[in-house]
Amino acid sequence: MTTTLIDGIGLLYTGDPEREEIPDAALLIEDGLVAWTGPAAQAPDADERVDAAGRAVIPGFVDSHAHLVFAGDRTAEFQARMSGEPYTGGGIRTTVAATRRASEAELATRARALVTEMLAQGTTTVEIKSGYGLSVEHERRSLEIATGLTDETTFLGAHVVPADMDADSYVRLVAGEMLEACAPYAKWVDVFCERGAFDGDQTREILAAGLKAGLGVRVHANQLTEGPGVRIACELGAASADHCTHLTPGDVEALSSSGTVATLLPGAEFSTRSPYPDARGLIDAGVTVALATDCNPGSSFTSSMAFCVALAVREMRMTPLEAVRAATYGGARALRRTDVGWLRRGARADLVVLDAPSYVHLAYRPGVPLVHQVFHGGLLL
Ligand SMILES: [Zn+2]
């Protein structure tokens, strides 16, 4: 078994709440896992040595919310929005039509390209949702493609009601035959709980069916308006309530007294020119916050977690430390994972060597490619 020591780390952000930052650090990788972290002066011997030359190291980003299985292009919709038209979520149906027309090979190639693009930017764990098929066969196909790319797959048949069905029959289909076909390929079930998508009762019905089928729960909640999404997520013990842009004090209270993570997706507010969620209020209330890209062709076509960190700091008043924590440790909590999102003994050796002396540069130097090296499962990419 070969051991690799990364030393000369100017600043190691471990993501481990017990010892979050270590200056002048080293990290030992053994068998794909983190075997040791600490001051470089105390580093153990190793078979191989990588000199970080004063650079900062952080855990690989955990992007806990992404929609990567789709076809088509929505440049025109973005262009129209930037010319003043409002975002309503209706453009999802455009992607559904293109996705249904595309071959399985085309969809898989495009999704794989996005995962590769993410990995090169330091994202070593990604969640992938279905939701652009909206028929039994097309949802199943999307999830089958997703399982080839990640362990974190989410059944989002309840993304929007397809143009060719009425809401009641579609909810019955999603909670019945579609769930049955998709559950073998999914770890999670998700619903877009929003005016114009699915209401509280429909959301409860679908999530309850998902739970019964053995899936974990996550919810697209309170993105465009206040609504019941966050409270339903907390009631059902969801791992995460995602978006959380329009919250009442009662929603914040529900989040802080539950184990449900608030996953913030500032790329969506950026790309729809909308007000950002109140990250400060959530953190100050003791809520665990995650940051994710929401990578999708309509409302947030970015795959960059570094960009989301910069937005979180500049637009949502998170400190650089809080933002990096939310993009790593927070994302792992939102997926109920303890093997990723931090660099402690026994965790998967997923880490990013930044071309910077500190993780603060992710926000301080926005838009600049700062990834020097990525290790995934202990292997240098
Ligand atoms: Zn989403």
Image: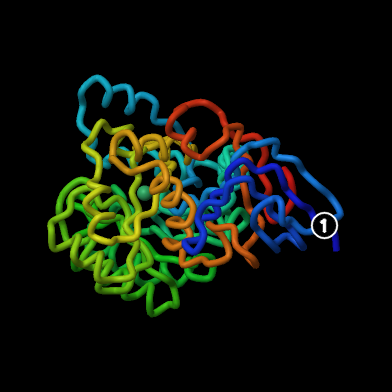
Of residues 309 and 248, the one nearer the viewer is 309
Quadrant (top left/top right/bottom left/bottom right) for the C terminus: top right
Of residues 168 and 122, the one nearer the viewer is 122
Residue 235 on image: x %, y %: 25, 73
The total of numbered circles placed on residues is 1
Residue 182 on image: x %, y %: 48, 66
Asked whether mark 1 and ligand 1 are closer than 8 Å, the reply comes as no
Q: Is residue 323 visible?
A: yes
Taking the image as shown, residue 250 lies to the left or right of residue 121, namely: left
- Identify the residue at image location x=16%, y=48%: 225
Numbered disc 1: secondary structure = loop
Residue 173 on image: x %, y %: 34, 66
- Identify the residue at image location x=45%, y=72%: 180
Residue 102 on image: x %, y %: 53, 41
Quadrant (top left/top right/bottom left/bottom right) for the N terminus: bottom right
- Identify the residue at image location x=51%, y=66%: 337
**Picture quadrant of residue 54:** top right
Amino acid, disc 1: Asp
Of residues 207 and 309, the one nearer the viewer is 309
- Identify the residue at image location x=35%, y=24%: 76
Residue lying furthest bottom in this view? 212
* Residue underneath mark 1: 45
Crowding near the residue tagged with mark 1, few <14, some 14–19, many ≥20 C-alpha atoms within 10 Å: few
**Picture quadrant of residue 295:** top left
Taking the image as shown, residue 12 lies to the left or right of residue 2, namely: left
Q: Is residue 112 visible?
A: no
Of residues 132 and 285, the one nearer the viewer is 285
